Image (cartoon, helix red, strand yellow):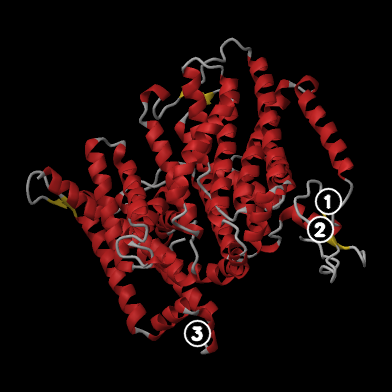
């Protein structure tokens, strides 16, 4: 898709379509080693490093979901913190009812998906920037409503129940594993989704919405599905966030800064690529850890880099790398080869 | 009588929302750009009034005489550089860039001036008000802000319909290519529109700083209110924005009357209701809808 194709179909229609620039065996083996290593990480590294990795993977989850929304479906949401917060509070509520917090993670995702579905019917009435600010209104409204519920701690928040039996290092250990598995499912799920029929529909909408519509793509329902999936993913991120902290407060889980981080990370890494948000998250974390003594400067620097990237390198770091070396680790596109005159 | 006061306070604050929103409305109408840093620009204007004007030995009440033209200039320059550059890419990029600017400005203000609240000192005017009855009170300052909002809207309406530059702005807004073919330099026209939008937002920021305390993070919530005013009134209608602002203000005051916690919530609920029942807004055309 981004590669120059070697020509159109021959007269007799003999074309072949590839899904990858290289043998998928390499990706598969590499992915297997990486998964094994990251699953073993808490046994290898210190508890403090595990906590850092936890926060890293929370950002990876959010950024991957934001990238799916904006990079693939063209919806710039600055209200994804609505679902981070609602996921967090779903976990809190279920834990207060006596459930194991770790078991509530998938339920938090389901709750967010269920809430986001009717919300799309309101939000999809607006487009472009008005859609963006409306998502923020939704997040603000969700925060204000949660803040009035006394059982959930009102505006001051409350600590997560159900984790008292665990020692702090055990909590760090378990929440790392939970976060890492959620991140794995989210990234792998997004990869699978984009290689499926939906991925093809989204690519056709991105390239030419009118043409996609007239070819029978249901633009609205494809976007709706993406919005619901992104809400579920952000809900799961909110759930693991409050388990790892473990404290829930409306102004922190519904913070606009989540949206800012998702946006910056995806922008810098590369919108519309699976690898981009992961690379962006890594850069963000290195910068944050290095500059953490200097207050908010890491956010100012990171934001400036994001603006520069958006204007001069809109495909992000990974996009630039990919264009230069014609390689993809997690390819979701299609390459059309002409069999009679190969490249 | 209590309810009358609630409505009056709502109308007064609604004037402020309209003043805040008309720059947003203009930028969208002409440039098709949503400036997500709109609220933060207002806050910057507030800081400029507090920290810049004392150096010039001007009382803070009159700070707008300096800050408003200054912001017009900033608006023109920012438009001709950063915003135009992102418009040339696509509408998507303008959202990313202005949101990035918003976060940068907010955190820069936090680093430089801390999170402490600031106010623009206007002396005893802040407490002066008119009491027609024991329950109703009308603050002179709020009345002045409402008056300023109406004046700005009248000025904009006259400017856009009566002057050559105004007609040029409308021509570019309607059909950029056709205006270009007729010899209009659309980049310069965009710059002028942005200058006006920034001047109005500076005025709104100073009004806000006179009415209440502001902090680096005040921009976001005001952008939300301005945006709600625009959508409730109808996207693309200047007078609709005033009506939308008043409707929002009245809804918020009603909410606050029951419980201060419900003030913002009531406004958000009105916004979502309008979106559900009449998405084009009270006075809007259907063009801005998906």
Q: State which tag comes first along the sequence, 2 or 1.
A: 1
Residue highlighted by disc 2: A335
Dot 1 alpha-carbon crowd within 10 angstroms: few under 14, some 14 to 19, many 20 or more: some
Residue nearest the viewer, comparing B37 with A276? A276
Q: Chain of mark 2?
A: A
| Residue A291, position as x, y percentages in the image | 67, 40
Q: How many numbered marks are there?
A: 3
Q: Element under label 3?
A: helix
Q: Which mark is residue B179?
A: 3
Q: Are marks 2 and 1 in contact (CB under 8 Å)?
A: yes
Extreme residue in the front direction:
A12
Q: Residue at x 39, y 80 (%)?
A: B166
| Residue A204, position as x, y percentages in the image | 66, 60
Quadrant containing the N terminus of chain A is bottom right
Q: Chain of mark 1?
A: A
Q: Is residue A163 left or right of residue A139?
A: right
Extreme residue in the left direction:
B133
| Residue A50, position as x, y percentages in the image | 71, 25
Q: Are marks 3 and 1 in contact (CB under 8 Å)?
A: no
Q: Residue at x 33, y 45 (%)?
A: B269
Q: Element under label 2?
A: strand
Residue highlighted by disc 1: A20
Badge 3 and badge 1 both on one subunit: no
Residue B220 in sight from this viewpoint = no
Quadrant containing the C terminus of chain A is bottom right
Q: Residue at x 56, y 17 (%)?
A: A100
| Residue A252, position as x, y percentages in the image | 50, 34
């Amino acid at each position: 898709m981004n590669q120059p194709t070697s020509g159109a179909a021959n007269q007799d229609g003999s074309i072949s379509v590839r899904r990858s620039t290289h043998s998928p065996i390499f990706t598969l083996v590499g992915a297997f080693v990486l998964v094994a290593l990251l699953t073993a990480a808490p046994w290898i590294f210190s508890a403090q490093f595990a906590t850092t990795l936890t926060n890293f993977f929370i950002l990876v989850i959010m950024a991957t979901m934001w990238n799916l929304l904006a990079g693939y479906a063209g919806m710039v949401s600055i209200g994804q913190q609505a679902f981070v917060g609602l996921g967090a509070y779903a976990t809190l509520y279920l834990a207060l009812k006596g459930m194991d917090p770790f078991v509530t993670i998938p339920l938090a995702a389901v709750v967010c998906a269920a809430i986001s579905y009717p919300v799309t019917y309101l939000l999809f009435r607006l487009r472009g920037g008005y859609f963006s600010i409306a998502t923020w209104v939704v997040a603000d409204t969700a925060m204000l409503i949660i803040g009035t519920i006394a059982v959930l701690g009102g505006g001051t928040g409350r600590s997560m129940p159900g984790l008292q039996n665990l020692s702090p290092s055990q909590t760090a250990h378990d929440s790392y594993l939970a976060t890492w598995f959620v991140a794995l499912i989210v990234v792998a799920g997004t990869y699978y989704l984009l290689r499926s029929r939906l991925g093809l529909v989204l690519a056709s909408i991105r390239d030419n919405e009118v043409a996609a519509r007239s070819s029978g793509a249901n633009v609205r329902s494809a976007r709706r599905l993406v919005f619901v999936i992104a809400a579920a993913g952000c809900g799961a991120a909110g759930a693991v966030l409050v388990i790892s902290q473990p404290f829930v407060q409306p102004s922190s889980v519904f913070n606009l800064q989540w949206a800012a981080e998702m946006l910056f990370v995806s922008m810098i890494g590369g919108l519309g690529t699976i690898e981009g948000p992961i690379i962006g998250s890594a850069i963000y974390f290195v910068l944050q850890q290095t500059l953490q003594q200097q207050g908010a400067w890491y956010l100012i620097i990171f934001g400036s880099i994001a603006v520069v990237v958006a204007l001069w390198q809109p495909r992000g770091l990974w996009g630039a790398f990919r264009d230069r070396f014609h390689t993809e680790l997690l390819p979701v596109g299609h390459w059309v080869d002409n069999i009679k005159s190969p490249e | 009588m209590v309810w009358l006061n609630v409505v009056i306070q709502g109308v007064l604050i609604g004037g402020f929302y309209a003043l805040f929103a008309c720059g947003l409305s203009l930028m969208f109408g002409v440039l098709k750009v949503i400036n997500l840093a709109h609220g933060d620009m207002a806050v910057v204007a507030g800081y400029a009034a507090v920290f810049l004007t004392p150096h010039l030995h001007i009382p803070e009440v009159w700070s707008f005489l300096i800050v408003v033209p200054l912001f017009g200039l900033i608006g023109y320059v920012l438009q001709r550089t950063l915003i135009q550059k992102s418009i040339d890419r696509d509408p998507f990029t303008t959202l990313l860039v202005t949101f990035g600017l918003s976060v940068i400005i907010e955190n820069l203000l936090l680093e430089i001036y801390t999170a402490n609240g600031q106010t623009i000192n206007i002396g005893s005017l802040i407490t002066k008000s008119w009491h027609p009855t024991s329950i109703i009170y009308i603050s002179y300052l709020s009345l002045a802000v409402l008056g300023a909002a109406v004046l700005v809207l009248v000025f904009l309406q006259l400017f856009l319909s009566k002057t050559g530059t105004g007609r040029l702005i409308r021509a570019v807004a309607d059909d950029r290519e056709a205006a270009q073919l007729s010899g209009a330099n659309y980049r310069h026209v965009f710059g002028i529109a942005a200058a006006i939008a920034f001047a109005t937002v500076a005025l709104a920021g100073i009004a806000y700083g006179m009415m209440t305390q502001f902090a680096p993070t005040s921009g976001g919530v005001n952008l939300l209110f301005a945006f709600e005013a625009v959508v409730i009134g109808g996207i693309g209608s200047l007078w609709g924005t005033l009506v939308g602002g008043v409707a929002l203000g009245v809804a918020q005051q009603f909410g606050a009357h029951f419980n201060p916690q419900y003030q913002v919530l009531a406004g958000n609920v009105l916004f979502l209701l309008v979106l559900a029942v009449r998405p084009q807004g009270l006075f809007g055309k259907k063009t801005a809808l998906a």
